[in-house]
Image: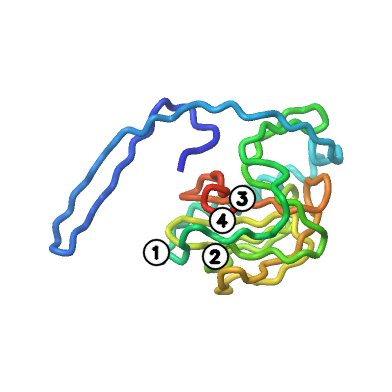
């Protein structure tokens, strides 16, 4: 995975291969990284989600650290296969990578894909896996994170209700929660993020769209 904010012109790729006869080989390559310009999206939200009050600053830092600790773990079992399942049938309303301007102030780019949906609509798991986080975060609202194995995670944000619990093994298409408008939003929708080895990447490339 390549981070949306990567500055390097190239990145090293290292592949370690372990053969059944005990032989081990290492292959390396340099991957070019090309800059891409993303469109600007301007949104109007509550002031507290653009300039959070001092009393929630520590909470935001704690939640960011909690999420980071979850999506950087690499479990040894692969549960996923491609293409993954579309989580809701609604149209895509916001693409990955958009430069976000809230109330006239530029903030972090959009590291997910937004789907149109109505409050209470079910949200389907992209694939089988294990639920590793069920929480209420300041910006993300009610969030569920599913570990699909080998460093691949799906994140479902702004839910109105949870249908799963931490440690639960879930099937492909199982309802993880219900559409809502919790956290920093302009209305009910699903924000889907997709993490690979700790980086939030464009999950739409892995989903049957």
Nearest the eye: 153 or 87: 87
Q: Nearer the viewer, mark 1 or mark 4?
A: 4
Q: Report, in whole angstroms, how far the alpha carbon at label 1 lies from the one at label 4.
A: 25 Å
- Return the x and y of residue 44 as percentages of the image width and height: 84, 36
- Whichever of labels 1 and 2 marks the residue nearer the N terminus, that label is 1
Residue 30, given in percent of the width and then of the height, sits at: 32, 33
**Which residue ends up furthest to the right in the rendered image?**
46
In the rendered image, which quarter contains the N terminus? Answer: top left
Give the image quarter of residue 36.
Answer: top right
Residue 193, numbered circle:
3
Q: Secondary structure at mark 1?
A: loop
Q: Nearer the viewer, mark 3 or mark 2?
A: 2
Residue occupying image coordinates x 65% and y 60%: 87
Label 4 sits on a secondary structure element that is: loop
Q: CA distance from mark 3 to mark 2?
A: 14 Å
Image disc number at residue 208: 4
Between marks 3 and 1 in the image, the one whose residue lies nearer the viewer: 3
Q: Which mark, by number, is residue 127?
A: 2
Residue placed most toward the observer, 86 or 131: 86
How far separated are the C-alphas under marks 1 and 2? Answer: 16 Å
Residue that numbered label 1 is attached to: 76
- Residue at 58% x, 57% y: name it: 154
> Which of labels 2 and 4 is toward the front?
4
Residue at the (62%, 41%) spot, across then down: 96
User: Is residue 137 in sight in this rendering?
Assistant: no
Q: Are marks 3 and 1 in contact (CB under 8 Å)?
A: no
């Amino acid at each position: 995975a390549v981070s949306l904010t990567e500055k390097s012109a190239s990145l090293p790729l290292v592949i370690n291969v372990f053969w059944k006869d005990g032989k081990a080989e290492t292959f390396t390559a340099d991957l070019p990284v090309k800059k891409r310009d993303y469109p600007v999206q301007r949104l109007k939200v509550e002031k507290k989600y653009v300039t959070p009050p001092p009393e929630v600053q520590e909470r935001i830092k704690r939640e960011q650290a909690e999420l980071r600790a979850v999506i950087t773990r690499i479990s040894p079992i692969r549960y996923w296969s491609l293409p993954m399942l579309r989580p809701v049938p609604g149209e895509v309303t916001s693409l990955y990578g958009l430069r976000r301007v809230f109330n006239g102030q530029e903030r972090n780019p959009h590291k997910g894909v937004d789907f149109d949906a109505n409050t209470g609509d079910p949200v389907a798991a992209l694939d089988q896996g294990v639920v590793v986080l069920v929480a209420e975060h300041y910006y993300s609202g009610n969030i569920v994170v599913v570990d699909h194995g080998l460093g691949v995670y799906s994140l479902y944000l702004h839910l109105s209700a949870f249908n799963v619990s931490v440690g639960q093994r879930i099937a492909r298409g199982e309802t993880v929660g219900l559409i809502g408008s919790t956290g920093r939003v302009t209305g009910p929708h699903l924000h889907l993020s997709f993490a690979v080895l700790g980086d939030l990447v464009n999950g739409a490339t892995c989903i049957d769209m």
